[in-house]
Image (tube, grey):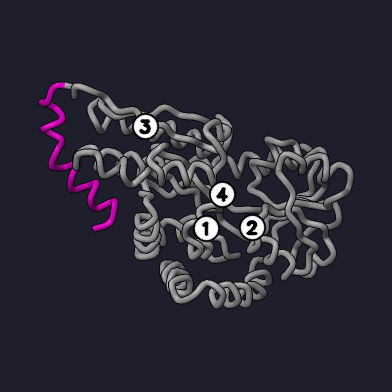
Amino acid sequence: MNRRTFAAFALAASVSALATLPALAQDINFRVNVPGNEDGIAFRSVEHFNEVLKDKSGGNLGTKLFHSSALGDQESSIEAMQSSILDMATIETPITAVAPELGATALPYIFSSREHVKAAMDGEAGQMIEAMLAEKGLRVVGFLEGGFRQVTNNVRPITTPEDLKGVKIRTPGSALRIAIFNHYGANASPLPFSELYSALQTGVYDGQENPVIWAQSTKFYEVQKYLSLTNHLYTVTYLLMAEDKFQSLTEDQQAAVLAAGEAAEARSVELGIKADAEIVSFLEEAGMEVNDADVEAFTAQSGQIWEDWAAEQGPDAQKLIDLIRAADQ
C-alpha cells in the first residue's frame, strides 16, 4: 500500500473519531527546515502543508517552519533527520548522498511534462523511491515542485546542443550536472550560487541553468541577455520526515501527515505553473530575448548520458529509469 492509499483509508476510518475526541494532552509541532526563502515555492507549499495538517488532525498537529536553511544546509538536514534531531525538511539534489540511484530523477529529459512527473511519483517509481529512503531513515511525505530548468547566457540563443559549444556555464556542484552540459559541448563548472551574479556580470561565466524563478528573484536579467526554454531537467523536491518521528505517531496522525503532503504537492505544482508563465513574461519585459529550444534535438543527444550514468550506478538505477519512462503513457 503506497502513502496515498494508506492516507485515504486511515483518514476515512478516523473522521468520526477526530470529531468526537477531546484535544490530545500534548500537541505536536514538527520543525521543518526549508532551503529557499519565504517567497519560494517550497516554503509556500509547506505553509499549505501546515494548514491542511492542522485541519486533518483536528488541530493537534502543526509545524514550525524555518526558511533559508536556518537550521543547516540540506546535507546537514538529512543527517539531522536520520539522527532524529530534526523532524522534517525539503531536500533536492543532495538526496543522492544517501541514495545515489535517485540521480535518475535528475537525468536530462527523463520527465517530459509535469503530468509525467505526477504519474511517475504516484506510481511504481515513486514507491521504489519511498522504499529506498525508508531504508535510510527518511519518510517521503510528498514530492514537491522544483521546476523545469532553463538556460540563460550572454553568447547566443540556445536552440540545439550545438549552440552550447564553448559557452561557459555555471552548474551546481553535482558531477552529473557538470557531465550533462559538458556532453552537450559547454564548458561547465560549479560555483556557489551566492557568487553567481557577480560571475555573470564580470564574464567569468557566460551563463547558468536554473528554474526561471531564480532569474527573476536574483535579478539575473540585469546581467543576462538570452533566456532559452530548454526544459532540460525537472527538479524533484522531496518533503521528508524522520522515519523515527513518523513511526512515533498514531495511525490517524500518520494519515493526516500524508494527506497534508499530498495537498502540498498539488499546491506546489499550481504555484510552479503560475510562476513560469508570469516570470517568463516579466523577463521578456525586462529586456531578455526568449526562445524555445529544440527539445527533440536535446533529447536525441541525452540517451548516452542515461546509459553511462546507469552503468556506473547499477541495476537499481536502471530499474528506476525504466519505471519513470514507463509512466509517460
Dot 2 or dot 4, earlier in sequence: 4
Local secondary structure at mark 4:
strand
Q: Nearer the viewer, residue 160 or 31?
A: 31
In the image, the segment drawn in magenta is 1-22
Q: Quadrant of residue 287?
A: top right
Q: Are marks 2 and 1 in contact (CB under 8 Å)?
A: yes
Q: Secondary structure at mark 3?
A: strand
The residue to which callout 3 is attached is 30
User: Magenta span has 319?
Assistant: no
| Distance between the alpha carbons at the discs numbered 1 and 3 | 24 Å
Which residue in the structure is indicated by mark 2? 174
Instruction: Check disc 4 and give the amino acid type.
Output: Gly
Q: Which residue is mark 4?
A: 147
Q: Nearer the viewer, mark 4 or mark 1?
A: 1
Q: Earlier in the sequence, mark 4 or mark 1?
A: 1
- Name the residue at 79% across, 70% down: 162
| Residue at left offset 70%, top offset 62% | 178
Residue at image location 54% in from the left, 48% down from the top: 146
